[in-house]
Image: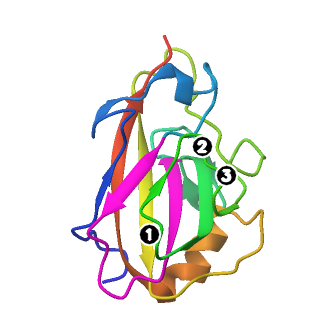
Amino acid sequence: MAFALTNMRVESPAFTDQGEIPTRHTGEGEDLSPALSWHDAPEGTKGFAVICHDPDAPLVEHGGYGFVHWVLYNLPGSTTSLEEASSEGTRGINHFGRNGYGGPMPPEGHGVHQYYFWVLALDKPTALPEGISMAELLKQVEPHLLGMNRLVGTYRRD
């Protein structure tokens, strides 16, 4: 059940589901994380984590695929939104080699990429150290995952 989608809704004032991510939230712009909000978290939620992942990126590493743009965790269960360029939570490492958000920047001419902004609802708060990878985060939270859902944005560089 853990990795099954739930009825939780994830939204952003910056773009709609399957809509184009504004340049300001990309590596070609100001590289700011978009504002996100969510509601209808599963009953018993005590913490959240957020991941932005591009499964269309041509990167295969350690058995995983795609490109990780954002790993954020240690968000309390009372959190229902993140402001643009949020400093809330604890930042994990992305595939740019930095902690925090790194916006979309697909290879030129590679076509449209999809960016999955996942919100994970957890049955307990976390106190994980800064700088862990998406794979390590998922390993740590999987036993505590009540459910998840996502907002998908698109971006392309010509």
**Left or right relative to 132: residue 41:** left
Report if residue 106 is visible in the image: no
**Residue linked to disc 3:** 87
Magenta region, residue range: 35-53
- Circle 1: residue type: Leu
Residue drawn at the location 30% of the way across and 84% of the way down: 1
Task: Let me know if residue 39 is in the magenta part.
Answer: yes
Q: Picture coordinates of residue 27 (x, y %)?
A: 63, 26
Label 1 or label 2, whichever comes before in sequence order: 2
Q: Picture coordinates of residue 52 (x, y %)?
A: 51, 50
Q: CA distance from mark 1 to mark 2?
A: 23 Å
Q: Is residue 98 above or below residue 49?
A: above
Label 1 or label 3, whichever comes before in sequence order: 3
Q: Is residue 85 above or below residue 133?
A: above
- Circle 2: residue type: Leu
**Residue linked to disc 2:** 59
- For numbered disc 3, what is the local secondary structure? loop
- Circle 3: residue type: Ser
Density class for disc 1 (Cα within 10 Å; few <14, some 14-19, many ≥20) is many
Q: Is residue 54 above or below residue 122?
A: above
Q: Name the outermost residue toward the left.
A: 7
Q: Which marked residue is nearer to the observer: mark 2 or mark 3?
A: 3
Q: Quadrant of residue 30?
A: top right
Density class for disc 2 (Cα within 10 Å; few <14, some 14-19, many ≥20) is few
For residue 120, which numbered disc appears in the image?
1
Q: Nearer the viewer, residue 80 or 133?
A: 80
Label 2 or label 3, whichever comes before in sequence order: 2
